[in-house]
Image: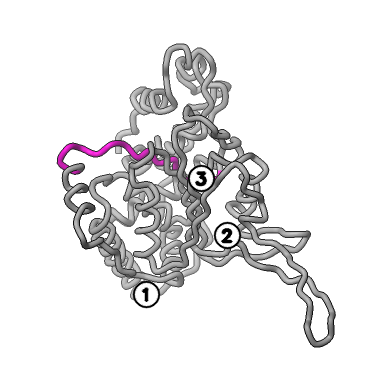
Amino acid sequence: MSSVTQQLEPEVLKSRIERFRQVQGEIVTQVRRVIVGQEEVLEQVMIGLFVGGHCLITGLPGTAKTLLVRTMSQTLGLVFRRIQFTPDLMPSDITGTDIIEEDPTTGRRTWTFVQGPIFGNVLLADEINRTPPKTQSALLEAMQERSCTVRGNGYTLPAPFFVLATQNPIELEGTYPLPEAQLDRFLFNIILDYLTADEELKVVDLTTVTTTAQADPVTNAKEILEFQQLVRMVPIGESVARHAVDMVRATRHVDPTAPDFVKKYVNYGASVRAAQFLVLSAKARALMKGRYHVTYEDIRALYIPVLRHRILLNFHAESDRLKQDDILKKVLEVKPAPRE
């Protein structure tokens, strides 16, 4: 798989990889001051940042979703914006809007664009499923094109640009499920679960005293963009890439390679975007684990968070009380990695 990458001098490449490792370690140290436990969640959010992908963070109220995102953006030294999604939020509340301004000296009126909260580097879309589809779609263009259109004028968003959206599980009242097209824009759907008893005790110790923990910035926007280029330069063997594609194809009931339980329970499988995201995030994971190439293990470790929001189950699955994760775990079982 040849990819057109900019050629870097070996010395430059080496120092950049070292810097990547250093920053990654520092991010973890800083976030650990504030966030307890959730190792996998932290790894996945970091992969999202190094890939330039958006993350959907799903968890019950009080599982530190918002705190995690805010802490992350502090550590990265990026411009942080937050939108609290509500049923009456309008698209212009996200993108910004044109207002008429009058020049006091000449009395002439002109349209001036006032930027909305979307013009930042890290956008926390809090409880994204609380707002109707019309408003959710204002984010769609921004997530895919890194730009937004207001009254026919296009505006480019700052780089890097990440949407870290949180949602409570759909069963709760007053929520609008995210449209499939929007779900597909997210690199990961990260599930935040309850902590262990020891971790919970540590949280209580940390948060019920007079001091509040703060994270310090360890990097900046320019460097993060360089890391994103670096991640794309990680080589992947054809057999590993093929395994990624096979694993994605196995979720489509129309595909001849799909296992029987997929044909029974899955209405729609994952798109080609899933394979792209799976390979990209595996490249970031390999680099974070100190390797210069992608392994089968990278692909398999990220398979569930990359695919859990991209497959739609049918009523058979519902009646058998099966979730996306159950199906994906079974796919991993019946399709082991080829022997190295």
Q: Is residue 100 magenta?
A: no
Circle 1: is it few (<14), some (14-19), or many (20+) Cα within 10 Å? few
Can residue 338 be spotted in the picture? yes
Q: Is residue 314 above or below residue 89?
A: above
Q: Residue at x 39, y 69 (%)?
A: 77
Q: CA distance from mark 1 to mark 3?
A: 32 Å
**Mark 2–mark 3 CB contact (< 8 Å):** no
Tag in front: 2 or 3? 2
Q: Earlier in the sequence, mark 1 or mark 2?
A: 1
Who's the residue at 35% across and 40% down the image? 192
Name the residue type under label 3.
Phe
Which colouring convention does the figure follow?
one colour
Residue occupying the far bottom of the picture: 105
Q: Magenta segment range?
A: 185-199
Q: Position of residue 100 (x, y in %)?
A: 77, 69
19 versus 66 height, above or below = below
Point out the frontmost of discs 1 and 3. 3
User: From mark 1 to mark 2, how far is it between C-alphas?
Assistant: 34 Å
Q: Which residue is mark 2?
A: 118
Q: Which residue is mark 1?
A: 12
| Residue 322 left/right relative to 316 | left
Read off the residue under disc 3: 186
Image position, residue 58 (x, y; %):
42, 39
Indicate whether residue 192 is drawn in magenta: yes
Specify whether 111 is left or right of 40.
right
Residue type indicated by callout 2: Ile
User: Viewer-proximal residue, 148 or 277?
Assistant: 148
- Under tag 1, what secondary structure? helix
Residue 173 location (% of width, % of height): 51, 30
